[in-house]
């Protein structure tokens, strides 16, 4: 009998800070590199958006090019902008979930929500990956018949996957669980 979760893959939106964490050695860097490798290997499906590439374009060279190259190198899917994203992002700001001045941050969350992804990987603890956002975004989404979304760091992605999918794939140390 086949396990119903055997082919399940988390669909993850990789927010701008995740690309920065990949390039810059800082706490969490190793887990971000491991996450990108897991996306490339097909364990997870990675997505990003024009909103991310617009922000990456503002970085200085060679960092800008190195971060943008990660999209193709790791097979990350680039999501197209949609008018529904702007409408939902504005609702997040109007409800005080994301500050009005942080349009791009609200668009990242809205893009992941409109495209019905499972979660956002972000190291933006000021506006995106914080308790208020984690609590209130699902409420707004449910009123729009959109599913809830989870917020992760790269390490939390692996912890979640290990907890809920019985450790399929690789362990934190990179060895097979088989």
Image (cartoon, grey):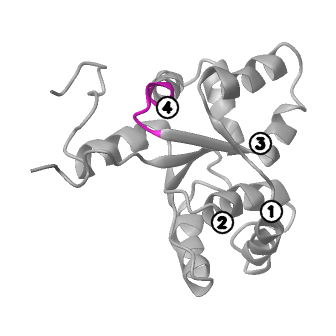
Residue 137 sits above or below residue 178 on the image: below
Question: Upstream in the sequence, badge 4 or badge 1?
Answer: 4
Q: CA distance from mark 3 to mark 1?
A: 14 Å
Q: Is residue 46 left or right of residue 111?
A: left
Residue 18 sits above or below residue 165 on the image: above
Asked if the residue under mark 1 is in contact with the one under mark 2, i.e. CB atoms within 8 Å, the reply is yes
Q: Is residue 75 left or right of residue 108?
A: left
Q: Is residue 43 left or right of residue 56?
A: left
Q: CA distance from mark 2 to mark 3?
A: 16 Å
Question: Upstream in the sequence, badge 3 or badge 4?
Answer: 4
Q: CA distance from mark 3 to mark 4?
A: 17 Å
Residue, disc 2: 114
x, y percent for residue 76: 62, 34
Residue, disc 1: 82
Asked if the residue under mark 3 is in contact with the one under mark 2, i.e. CB atoms within 8 Å, the reply is no
Residue 107 covered by magenta stretch: no
Question: Callout 1: 10 Å neighbours few (<14), some, many (20+)?
Answer: few
> Which residue corresponds to the image point at 24% horizontal and 18% vertical from the top-left?
175
Q: CA distance from mark 4 to mark 1?
A: 24 Å
Q: Which residues are magenta?
A: 38-44
Asked if the residue under mark 4 is in contact with the one under mark 2, i.e. CB atoms within 8 Å, the reply is no
Nearest to the eye among marks 3 and 4: give it: 4
> Which residue corresponds to the image point at 77% horizontal and 26% vertical from the top-left?
68
**Nearer the observer, 39 or 149:** 39
Residue, disc 4: 39
Residue, disc 3: 52
Question: Upstream in the sequence, badge 2 or badge 4?
Answer: 4
Seen as rendered, the residue at the extreme left is: 1
Question: Upstream in the sequence, badge 3 or badge 1?
Answer: 3
């Amino acid at each position: 009998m086949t396990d119903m979760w055997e082919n399940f893959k988390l669909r993850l939106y990789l927010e701008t800070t995740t690309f920065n964490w990949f390039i810059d050695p800082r706490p969490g860097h190793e887990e971000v590199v491991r996450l990108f490798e897991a996306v490339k290997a097909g364990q997870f499906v990675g997505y990003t958006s024009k909103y991310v590439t617009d922000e990456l374009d503002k970085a200085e060279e060679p960092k800008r090019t190195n971060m943008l190259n990660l999209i193709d190198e790791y097979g990350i899917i680039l999501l197209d902008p949609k008018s529904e994203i702007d409408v939902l992002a504005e609702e997040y700001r109007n409800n005080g979930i994301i500050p009005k001045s942080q349009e791009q941050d609200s668009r990242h969350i809205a893009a992941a929500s409109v495209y019905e992804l499972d979660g956002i990987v972000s190291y933006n603890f000021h506006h995106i990956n914080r308790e208020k956002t984690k609590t209130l975004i699902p409420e707004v989404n449910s009123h729009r018949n959109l599913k809830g979304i989870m917020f992760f760091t790269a390490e939390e992605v692996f912890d979640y996957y290990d907890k809920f999918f019985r450790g399929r794939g690789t362990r934190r140390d990179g060895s097979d669980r088989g």
